[in-house]
Amino acid sequence: MKFRNTLFFFLILFLIIPSLYSVNIKVRVLSEYKVKSVDVKIASGKYMILCNNVKVFVEDLSPDEALTLTLHNNQIRVEKGIELIGTYNFIEFVGKKYNNIFCLNSSQIDRKRTYEEHLTVVANGNDMVFVNRIDLEKYVAGVVQSEVFGSSEDVEFFKIQATASRTYALANINRHLKEGYNLCDAVHCQAYKGKCTKPDILRGTFESFSDVIVDSSNKLITAAYHSNSGGMTEDAHNIWQAKVPYLRSIIDSFSVGAKNYEWGKNIPKQQWINYFISKYGENYKKPEIQEEIFNFTQNERIAKWVIGEDTIPTKNIREYFSLRSSFFSVELANDTVYLHGKGYGHGVGLSQEGAIQMVKKGYSYIDILQFYYSQTQVVKYTEIIDF
Ligand SMILES: [Zn+2]
């Protein structure tokens, strides 16, 4: 009963808040699928249907009513049950109430998706492009559920993720403008698999409503995050060649001992040698040079491993051998190279597992964001952006 009450409370807030202050964004959904036919079913609210800008039904569509859209000769054929409505270039589902929800179902997608607010479907050559126009805060809650759900149950942690995701979304708001929308729903922008259904995530998003992270010049930051830093975060310069004052390497004791703190991998000796020969030359056939590639220790993160004349980025080794991190040490025993690693991910910015530990120790979400993103502030985006 408590769960239902909490859910209801935050759903109500989410219905009221956008009507008081609302920024709508356009997100391309199902961007990773080639959809040839889809059922759009109304789950809640009322929808006005516009086909090539013309209203085609006298009555708005109600819950349980559905339209089938099928790509046909580079246009979209619209059917309601067995009735053919017509063939058009674009279809709009315009939500008319506060609680408008629709579902998309197709044999060409992994599972049914549920979204809030409005939908536009455009025929684009051999594709249908689906764009969900939605309030920014509802989108952020959907992203937090898609990106991190399961790693924590703590509202304070969801406030951190919501603030980071909101900052990322607004910093990249023009990314797909030429294609007619703001963001896509893939990891290229941020994973967004539809409506948020978890009350604690809705609460974390609401409690951090409109919060974003800015640097000392009041610019939205690149809110990079990863799973576990291994006890020390990475400098952005070592990964992306850009010097970013708030993404500097820091000692992070909060990540130590968490689930993804340590890892190990065994690689056959010859495979390890072959990597260095193929990438850095015949020199690595010499036993005295090989000695060096079997002995490497990182107590602190080393971005560039210097062997003779060569400077080898540890991130390249990580990529080639699909390692969890570039923070590893090397040891040889018999014919096997043992890699002992720390952390999971690129290591830049916020460590999710470190942040979860900080929440448990009683730090506030703003303290935690300022720990991982040094010299930054949390402000309301209305203070820095004019919409
Ligand atoms: Zn994108």
Image (spheres, rainbow, N blue to C red):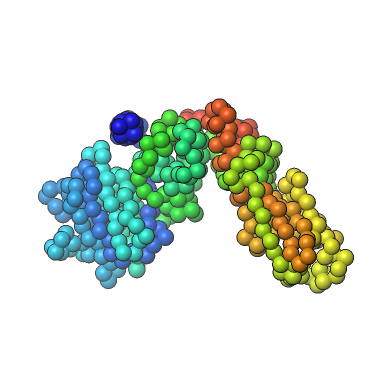
Q: Left of 156 or right of it: where is 323?
A: right
Quarter occupied by the C terminus: top left
Residue under the point 29% across and 68% down? 74
Q: Is residue 153 visible?
A: yes
- Residue 116: horizontal and vertical position, in percent? 31, 45
Q: Is residue 236 left or right of residue 87?
A: right
Regarding residue 311, the answer to whether it shows in the image is: no
The picture quadrant where one finds residue 200 is top left
| In the image, farthest residue toward the right | 288
Residue at 32% x, 48% y is: 115
**Could you tell whether 124 is left or right of 263 in the image?**
left
Residue 177 percent across, percent down from the top left: 43, 51
Q: Residue at x 75, y 59 (%)?
A: 312
| Above or below 111: residue 385 | above
Q: Nearer the viewer, residue 369 or 22?
A: 369
Left/right of residue 53 with respect to residue 301 in the rendered view: left
The residue at 67%/55% (across/down) is 264
**Quick one: quadrant of the N terminus?**
top left
Q: Position of residue 2 (x, y in %)?
A: 33, 30
Residue lying furthest front: 334
Q: Is residue 75 above or below residue 384?
A: below
- Residue 145 location (% of width, % of height): 42, 44
- Which of 287 and 142 lies nearest the eye of the viewer? 287
